[in-house]
Amino acid sequence: MSRSIVMRLVLKDFYLQWPVLAGALLLGFAMLALALFGGGPITFYVGSVSFLCVLILLNVLLVGSIVAQEKKDRVILFVLSLPVSTTQYALTKLVSSLLAFLIPFCLLGAAAVLAIALTPIPHGLIPLTMAVMMYVCLYFCIFLAVALAADSALLNTIVIILGNVLINFLIAWLLNRASVALAAKGPVAIWSPEILTSLTVEILGSLVALAAALLIILRKKDFL
Amino acid sequence: MTDLAIELEGVAKAYRFFALKDVSLTLPCGQIMGLVGPNGAGKSTLIRILMSLIQQDHGKVRVLGHSMPEEQVAAKWQVGYVSEDMRLYGYGTLGWHMRFVASIYPSWDAPYAQTLLKRFNLRTDQQIRSLSHGERAKATLLLMLARRPRLLLLDEPTTGLDPVARHEMLIELMDVLRDERRAILFSSHNTQDVEQISDQITFIDRGRIIDSSDKETFIEHWRRLKLEVPGGVTLPTLAGVVDLDLSGHIATVTTNAHSDELVRAYVNAGATVHEVQRMTLEEIFVANVMASRKERAS
């Protein structure tokens, strides 16, 4: 019985977030089209930067409204009045945020990789695109973990600022590696050690952040 | 099956600047208990422990026979909880909320929900964010009552409501008690509301239960005596006197154990009793809190 309520709570989060999900998908595909089919370097730059912004915005909006806002607005009291334990509630938040982010993230990521692979754009961009996109995934996982673990608007703000600033350092670091910069312009996708290192760090970092969130949820006694 | 809706035994919860200390309390089924205390007394902390929203550091908590927090899910099926700061989803309509709650509770009473909708003058197609504070409070109460819970935990539900909305809410709560298996724990700092609907009253201050009894006992045992004390007369120290205020030759005595013997003892000591006043619940509450603080300070 309780498991079906957890499912209902996840579906409820999806129902409440559908405008954000639909908006992110619509804007993401539009920015991708602008970048890849705009016909010039400026449209490519504007399109790809906006595409990244859409992913980051999706991250911030989802965690903000599914986890942080629900606590801040005291809607959490209504949900916790239902027959769910506080641990089940937190797990619900983890699952629904993760799914709500990963579905559009994977769709947009797959579309970006496919679009590069199927158009005359240099295929060497694929590894760089994936490394930058995985950074957004890491950023999401850390933000989600912090929002679930701590009830602090200040901490959330610090994570958002750091997340938005550090992406510039990552892109600058990758493009300063000759192997990455040259390969990005090439016709074949080359998985250089720098790209593989950043992908490994991002994937492991995401998993560690989620595991930490899970651990904190299971140990947490008070949710208010 | 248990006859007690709530059992608290030696419950403690410590925060940096506040602590709930050694709280022991029982509420039998079919009773309404008013939990009265000033702001920051620990009313919300106590109710949140009962709902397992926070966990006690020490002590035993049982709700409808279920040990908390271990069996919180089983208990919550039969508990309705509303607090003054509880909010609903602003962009959802009341109708959406009703369907959502109804999809969870097999006990959802749809005809009763419709009755409450009419009684509270609410509309299902209205978004929650467009409702006034009073309408939101009534919507929350509707969502809770239509589940037909056996125990209602209400944390200052009437705070900020206009007199009409407050009256409607209290009437509805009294209606709930027609089913004698149900119980209500109702916290408030408004003694009028508590006096209106409660069978039992518990006073809480600074994290401690300072007194708990049925309403009639409070009303019958508490009195304020106005005495004239001639020069040279010393008033005796009597059990049950919680406050003695002497101003010139006039003394005001507040007692929680009024009896003819008490009056006689003052008369025998040489004082003249001018007046024996009944006290309102608010006066009893204030006197009780002040006496408890004085006792702890000394």
Image (cartoon, coloured by chain):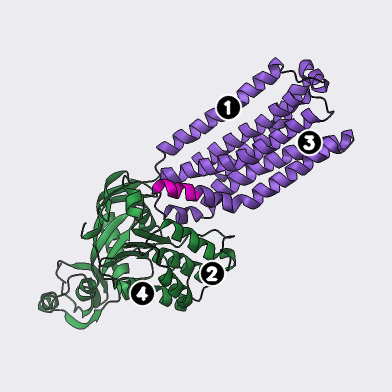
Chain colours: A purple, B green
Asked if the residue at tag 1 contacts the one at tag 3, i.e. Cβ–Cβ closer than 8 Å, the answer is: no
| Residue that numbered label 2 is attached to | B124
> Which mark, by number, is residue B151?
none
> Which mark, by number, is residue B192?
4
C-alpha distance separating marks 2 and 4: 32 Å
Q: Which residues are magenta?
A: A2-9
Asked if the residue at tag 3 contacts the one at tag 2, i.e. Cβ–Cβ closer than 8 Å, the answer is: no
C-alpha distance separating marks 2 and 3: 44 Å
C-alpha distance separating marks 4 and 3: 64 Å
Identify the residue shown where x is 82% and y is 30%: A119
- Tell me residue B173's x, y (percent): 36, 71
Point out the tag, 2 or 4, that comes first from the N-terminus. Answer: 2
- Tell me residue B36's x, y (percent): 33, 65
Question: Relative to residue B274, is residue A143 depicted above or below?
Answer: above
| Residue that numbered label 1 is attached to | A205
Labels 2 and 3 share a subunit: no
Q: Mark 1, mark 2: which one is toward the viewer?
A: 2
The chain ID associated with circle 1 is: A
- State the residue in front, B170 or A99: A99
In what element is the residue under mark 4?
helix
Q: Mark 2, mark 4: which one is toward the viewer?
A: 2
Q: Mark 3, mark 1: which one is toward the viewer?
A: 3
Asked if the residue at tag 4 contacts the one at tag 2, i.e. Cβ–Cβ closer than 8 Å, the answer is: no
Asked if the residue at tag 1 contacts the one at tag 4, i.e. Cβ–Cβ closer than 8 Å, the answer is: no
Labels 4 and 3 share a subunit: no
Identify the residue shown where x is 20% and y is 76%: B220
Q: Residues within 10 Å of mark 2 (few under 14, many from 20)?
A: some
Disc 1 residue type (three-letter)? Gly
Point out the tag, 3 or 1, that comes first from the N-terminus. Answer: 3
Identify the residue shown where x is 41% and y is 77%: B167
| Residue that numbered label 3 is attached to | A48
Disc 4 residue type (three-letter)? Gln
